[in-house]
Image (cartoon, rainbow, N blue to C red):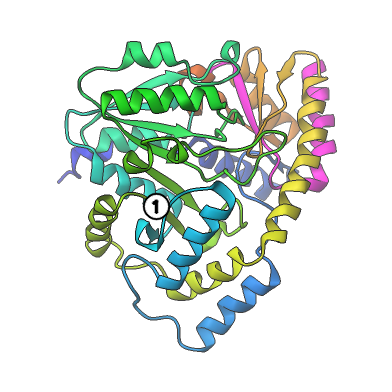
Amino acid sequence: MRVAQRIGLLTGEGALEVYARAKELERAGRSVIHLELGEPDFHPAPQVLEAGRTAIAHGRDRYCASRGLPELRTAIAGYLIQTRALTCGAENVLVASGCKLALFLAMMALIEPGDEVLYPEPGFPIYPSVARCFGARPVAHRLLEANDFQPDLDEIVRLATPRTKVLILCSPNNPTGTVYSPQTLAGLARLARERDWWVISDEIYARIVYEKTFTSIATLDGMAERTIIIDGFSKSFAMTGWRLGYAVAPLAVIEALDKLVMNTFTCASEFVQVAAIEAIAQPRAVETMVAEYRRRRDVFAVGLDEIPGIRCRLPEGAFYAWARVANAEAVQRKLLEAAGVAAIHGLAFGASGVDYLRFSFAGASSELEEALRRIRCTMNV
């Protein structure tokens, strides 16, 4: 007996594989500094935890609306209007059990076998994995250092064919930390309108920006009706294990997603949604967290760039340092096995990442200086 062939088209995540090896080393008594996972070391605000506890105590652990609690969808719409200047209402929001699931359902709703999907590389490995699973051909457009890690519009034009159906964006980008420029977004929007593409805009890091200002492509002329925004509570609200994401889309797409919810997970947990309403009501918690990430970035990314043999640009958003290193794969292994510093080889994010390492500064505040010391010693050997 065999499982379906589509399972063989799916790939894993390099970060989780490195994490598993790092935990093996720790069980053997080794000291490991975890810079491989994009998981904040923050926890939700006390008011959020209390809201979750109270919801459970009051019996809010039952089935609820498949699209999400109406009060949460209203809160999300208001939050996006305030923080992103989006034009949307509660009817344009669907809640899912995690951002990945929202992305998975959106791609399932839009992609037909034989379609082509343009996605950024280096980028989140789930994009091409899920596209292949649904019978599409994933086509990578590169984010190169020579172009400041911005999408190259000319390359996208060359790669596009009549079968291109979906363009995936991720700004701020994982792993490069790039915030797409207004000029880039305007060019991408023009191509999407001219060629009648759907756009999936992964905005999970939209609140974690530093000097630059984030703009959603959905706010540009003619884009709200062809854009599906994917976002969630894991990164900006430090609620990774709560598993709560959402999609923002035209009503016809929301109705399609709702059918998929009814045929898969039924609804997101009610008490988690109640806690998420409280998270949105605590904007200072997000601001405090982002200020701390900025401090860590200025320590760690700058420190990396000062180490001979490493070049690291200051990330504009998210919480990753994307560092160019000769023999990056060998250095990644040496850092983990000999120095106890867990990072991800850039090849995990596509062929364009072969000469890079990704370090997360989201979850190791007290250990960043020690990590820099260990990396410095390893590079000097």
Q: Which residue is drawn at 68% across and 47% down?
A: 26
346 vs 136, left or right, is: right
Q: What stretch is highlighted in magenta?
A: 354-381
The residue labelled by disc 1 is 247
Picture layout, residue 106 above or below residue 180: below
The local secondary structure at tag 1 comes to strand
Task: Assess whether residue 231 is covered by the magenta stretch.
Answer: no
> Residue most toward the left?
1
3 vs 280, left or right, is: left
Q: Which residue is drawn at 22% across and 59% down?
A: 259
Between 15 and 80, the residue placed more toward the observer is: 80
22 vs 138, left or right, is: right
Residue 233 in sight here:
no
For badge 1, the amino acid type reads: Ala
Between 349 and 231, the residue placed more toward the observer is: 231
Task: Assess whether residue 357 is covered by the magenta stretch.
Answer: yes
Residue 336 in sight here:
yes
